[in-house]
Image: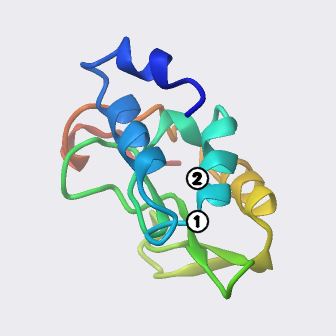
Amino acid sequence: MADNDALQTAPDDPVAAQWQLVREKGGHLIDKTLVEAAYANPVPRNLLVSHGSLQFSRCTRFPWSQDLPSIFPNGEWWFRVLRLYEPQGSGREQISSSVTADEAVELVASHLPAGWGPALDGTPDVLEPLT
């Protein structure tokens, strides 16, 4: 795994540790192309990530912030980008469907609101409201 040594030099960094775990997951649990595309982009790499789908959080402890775009599988080779809960509370927002892994990552990076991060150690109560 590329950059594995860099991750192991920061054991107190919960974001780097979670990325390492997600990058080590088997291909049957998460699309490896999507994970590596997201990890290669420095913007989402600063956010906490979960596995199965790529759901980004501005905090490192449960409950996750859920106010950033996330990437979900949409067929065998395609992905969709959703914001599960908008900061204004209006529900789900579909940003795109049927895009490649690289396109999905770029959409996440370009749809992050002002004040998005990097992720902070703690629960959502340590976060400033998004604008």
Q: Identify the residue at horizontal 25%, vertical 31% (top origin).
A: 121
Crowd around label 1: few <14 · some 14–19 · many ≥20 (10 Å): many
Q: CA distance from mark 2 to mark 1?
A: 6 Å
116 above or below 96? Answer: above
Spot the residue most to the top: 9
Residue 120 relative to residue 28: left or right: left
* Any part of residue 96 in sight: no
Q: Quadrant of the N terminus?
A: top right
Q: Position of residue 103 (x, y in %)?
A: 81, 60
Foreground residue, 53 or 1?
1
For mark 2, give the secondary structure.
helix
* Any part of residue 102 in sight: yes
Q: Identify the residue at horizontal 67%, vertical 88% (top origin).
A: 75
Residue 11 relative to residue 19: left or right: left
Foreground residue, 31 or 55?
31
102 above or below 24? Answer: below
Residue 35 tag number: 2
> Mark 2 is on which residue type?
Val
Residue 69 relative to residue 50: left or right: right
Disc 1: which residue: 31
Q: Position of residue 60 (x, y in %)?
A: 27, 41
Foreground residue, 70 or 12?
12
> Mark 1 is on which residue type?
Asp
The answer to whether the residues at label 2 and label 1 have Cβ atoms under 8 Å apart is yes
Give residue 26's quadrant in the image: bottom left
